[in-house]
Image (cartoon, rainbow, N blue to C red):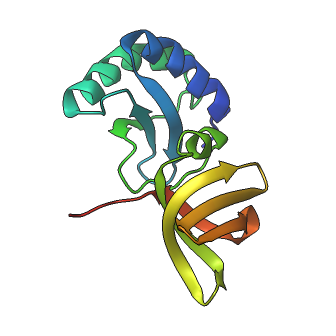
């Protein structure tokens, strides 16, 4: 299935979402027998089912007019980011500076491939994590498998 550029779709959707206090963070297409477009959203205070439904209703008809799949059918989903969503965009990293994150590495540092700590810095090539008072790592982005917000199950 051919689709319009994701950046174009995200910009279009944000024009509808932003006045509602909602941010479209990512649009994802899954192709195959039953194609789906999932719109991942966020807002201050978090996302609930009512917010997802509100945006779904607001974008359903305008998306038909935009025709992101050039007439091919797809199922539309609107979803929260989820607590374990990996950071993908620059904004994801920048918005978490000073916050606790989980890190999974390709190659171990000091014998470990998993760390959690405070994200203290980010540039497009590296992230810096403060693991404890004495330990800080600067990690090359090429060594990063996944980084997401720290999940505290207690």
Specify whether residue 4 is in view: no
**Outermost front residue:** 133
Side of 81 relative to 117 (left or right):
left
Q: Give x and y (percent) for residue 7.
A: 65, 30
Can you say whether 151 is above or below 52 in the image?
A: below
Corner quadrant of residue 53: top left
93 lies left or right of 125: left
| Residue at the extreme top | 19
Residue 119 picture location, percent across and down: 57, 54
Does residue 101 sit above or below 10 in this rendering? below
Q: With respect to residue 41, does 98 lie above or below?
A: below
Most foreground residue, 104 or 14: 104
The residue located at (57%, 81%) in the rendering is 113
For residue 45, side relative to residue 2 (left or right): left
Q: Residue at x 35, y 15 (%)?
A: 58
Viewer-proximal residue among 23 and 34: 23
- Where does residue 146 sit, x and y in percent of width and height? 56, 64
For the N terminus, give its image quadrant.
top right
Q: Name which residue lies at 35% across and 40% down.
A: 80
Out of 28 and 151, give the one closest to the viewer: 151
Answer with the quarter of the image where residue 43 lies. top left
Residue drawn where x is 40% and y is 57% of the image: 84
Q: Is residue 134 visible?
A: yes
Q: In what quadrant of the picture does the C terminus appear?
A: bottom left
């Amino acid at each position: 299935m051919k689709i319009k550029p994701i950046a174009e779709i995200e910009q279009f959707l944000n024009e509808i979402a932003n006045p509602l206090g909602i941010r479209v963070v990512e649009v994802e297409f899954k192709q195959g027998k039953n194609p789906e477009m999932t719109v991942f959203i966020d807002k201050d205070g978090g996302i609930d089912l009512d917010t997802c439904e509100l945006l779904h209703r607001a974008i359903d008809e305008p998306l038909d007019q935009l025709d992101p799949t050039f007439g091919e059918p797809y199922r539309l989903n609107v979803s929260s980011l989820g607590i374990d969503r990996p950071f993908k965009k620059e904004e994801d990293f920048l918005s978490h500076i000073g916050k606790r994150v989980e890190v999974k590495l390709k190659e171990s540092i000091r014998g470990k491939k998993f760390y959690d700590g405070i994200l203290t810095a980010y540039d497009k090539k590296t992230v810096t994590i403060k693991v404890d008072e004495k330990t800080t790592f600067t990690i090359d982005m090429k060594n990063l498998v996944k980084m997401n917000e720290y999940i505290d199950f207690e």
